[in-house]
Image: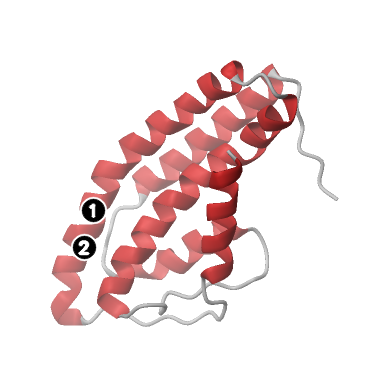
Amino acid sequence: MKKILIILLFIFFSLPAFAQYIPVPQEQSRQYKKEIEQVIKTQIPIAKKNIDNVFKEVELEKDEYEKVLKIEYSMDGILFGLYKLLINTTEKYVGKDKVYISEDGDTLSILFEALTPYLKDNRINSSKIYSLIKYAQKRQKELEKKYNYQIILE
């Protein structure tokens, strides 16, 4: 679990931090749409399965500290992985490090916000992504309730 957290932090801090939108070139839009839809089609079921596996991992965890870390960060890590795949695919068409994010606010929502213009401009149905986000939120609440855990915001 510590390795996963370190990897996520490394990836997060290695992302550029200035918002900028560079559209996918029109002649590549069709191919971009095809690739992104393939990522969504193949990765959403995997992410959903991984979300369900978090419950098993938490149940099997004996160390309370590790259990708390899994409850707090596992769902975000799964969504982060999906967003990163979508961003990497987008950067193939607009250039490496061109899908920038801001340092303000919730990281996951900012990653999705950075992707949103590309999804809209290329008429990509993002309903499966929204459904996955809602599913992750629902499962997170179930996990917190089951283990009487609540994230304390400071």
Task: Give yes or no for contact between labels 1 and 2 (Cβ–Cβ under 8 Å).
Answer: yes
Residue 116 placement: quadrant? bottom left
Image position, residue 65 (x, y; %): 74, 31
Count neighbours of disc 1 (C-alpha within 10 A) and say few if under 14, some if 14 to 19, many if 20 or more: some
Residue depicted at x 59% and y 58%: 9
From the image, tell me which residue sits under label 1: 37
Near mark 2 (Cα within 10 A), the count class, few <14, some 14-19 or many ≥20, is many
> From the viewer's perspective, is 44 left or right of 108?
left
Instruction: Residue type at mark 1: give it.
Output: Glu
* Mark 2, residue position: 33
Q: Residue furthest right?
A: 154
In the depicted structure, whether residue 88 falls above or below residue 71: below
Name the mark on residue 130: none
Residue 77, given in percent of the width and then of the height, sits at 52, 45
Q: Please, is residue 25 above or below residue 85 in the view?
A: below
What distance separates the C-alpha of mark 1 from that of mark 2? Answer: 6 Å
Residue 39 on image: x %, y %? 26, 51
Q: Residue 101 appears at what percent x and percent y?
A: 53, 72
72 on left or right of 41: right
Q: Quadrant of the N terminus?
A: top right
- Left/right placement of residue 53 relative to residue 6 reads left
Q: Residue at x 67, y 19 (%)?
A: 62
User: In the rendered image, is residue 119 in sight?
Assistant: no
